[in-house]
Amino acid sequence: MSQQIKIYDVAGAAGVSLATVSRVLNHPEKVKAETRERVLKIIKEKGYKPNANARGLASKRSTTVAIVIPSISRASVAEMIEGIYDSARKYGYTIRLFITKDEEDPRDAWSEVIASSVDGILFMNDETTDTTYREIAHTPVPVVFVNNISSSDEFGSISIDYEECAYQITKEMIKRGNKKILFIDTIHKYSANELKAAGYERAMKEAGLEIDILYSTGNININQNDFKTYLNKKVPEVALAVRDSMAISFMNVATKKGIKVPEQLQVIGFQNTRYAVLSNPTLTCVAASIYDIGSRAMSYLTEMMKDEQKNAEERESYQKKAANIIVDYDIVWRESTK
């Protein structure tokens, strides 16, 4: 039974945060006697056996940073991790990658991360639930959201303003005389994509134009069928996709159907990955330096990890002062638009 008990089970039963349980294990003198005794009682009753990593979490530096990410299959991820890695080397940190899966209990995944004796966490998962936020809020080390704006002022983040850039590119295409503008979004709920959709919808509503959103998947074997079905019914003047890969897939389907790009259909993507310049025609993109986002995220996390002598209460207070850093973006005009 003791092997099945995890740190969040103790925290939940005692009515305290994961950080408090960690303090009881590592710095009991910094916890109020009443709280300390309650946590220790739960630990004994449940037979919780913290591993060496969990015990060492708050007592020593590991010079290791965790990257938490749901998948490494996206083209933008490799470039972002490269930026993180280069910056981490400069500051003397090593990187440990944690790939979470959709089917996993987020508590299990997060428990494994915080029990791994890391000094800080770069959170690259933009499919963030309320449960995930609660787990992160109780993390006893600094956390920075990467390429994802945190909805809470408790966490630092670094990203571009996805809502504003989607609003501006949609507004620009309207200004150029386009009225039928399609927005291609993912079926899965991603916070960054929700912001892009909000920007698109705002621009369309302001212009009094009909909102047209097509939901599909990043898997080209599936989304091409969705795109064919859509294009059999109508052809928009502009298609704005949340990812370069989806924009290129849509453009390829349209081209095979004899629809001329950009004469009959203009296509725009997000991210400006290497595939944007390899497509035919080349893809217009909303662009930010993905490498730079990774590099700056690691630099920001390093600042948050500097004072290792802070106790947990001070660290939590410091984290609440964390800011959302907005990275500049640009629109790279290429052959897929007029």
Image (cartoon, rainbow, N blue to C red):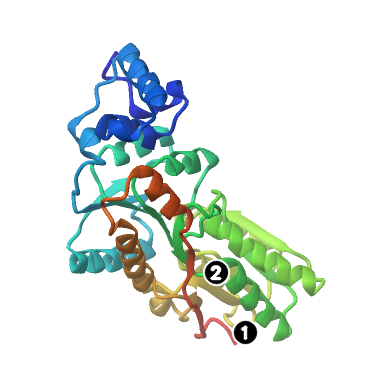
Q: CA distance from mark 2 to mark 1?
A: 30 Å
Q: Secondary structure at mark 2?
A: loop
Front of the two marks 2 and 1 = 2
121 relative to 18, above or below: below
Residue closest to the eye, 231 or 298: 298
Give the crowd class for mark 2: few <14, some 14-19, many >=20 residues within 10 Å.
many
Q: Is residue 2 visible?
A: yes
Task: Locate the N terminus and report the quarter of the image it occupies.
Answer: top left
Give the secondary structure at mark 1: loop
Place of residue 266 in the rendered image (x, y in percent of width and height, measured from the top left): 60, 78
Image: 110 above or below 32: below
On screen, residue 146 above or below 270: above
* Circle on res. 161: 2
Residue at image position (35%, 69%) is 296
- Chain-order first, disc 2 or disc 1: 2
Q: Position of residue 29 (x, y in %)?
A: 29, 32
Residue at the location (25% across, 47% down)?
118
Residue type pointed to by label 2: Asp
- Residue 283 image point, x, y percent: 48, 78
Q: Count residues near mark 1 (Cα–Cα under 10 Å), then give few for <14, some for 14-19, many for 20+.
A: few
The answer to which quarter of the image holds residue 104 is: top left
On the question of residue 70 being in view, the answer is no
**Observer-nearest of 19 and 118:** 19
- What mark, if any, has residue 263 been given in the picture? 1
What's the amino acid at mark 1?
Glu
Please report the residue visible at 52 percent of the width from the left and 43 percent of the height from the top: 129
> From the viewer's perspective, is 24 left or right of 263?
left
Splitting the image into 4 quarters, where does residue 102 fall?
A: top left
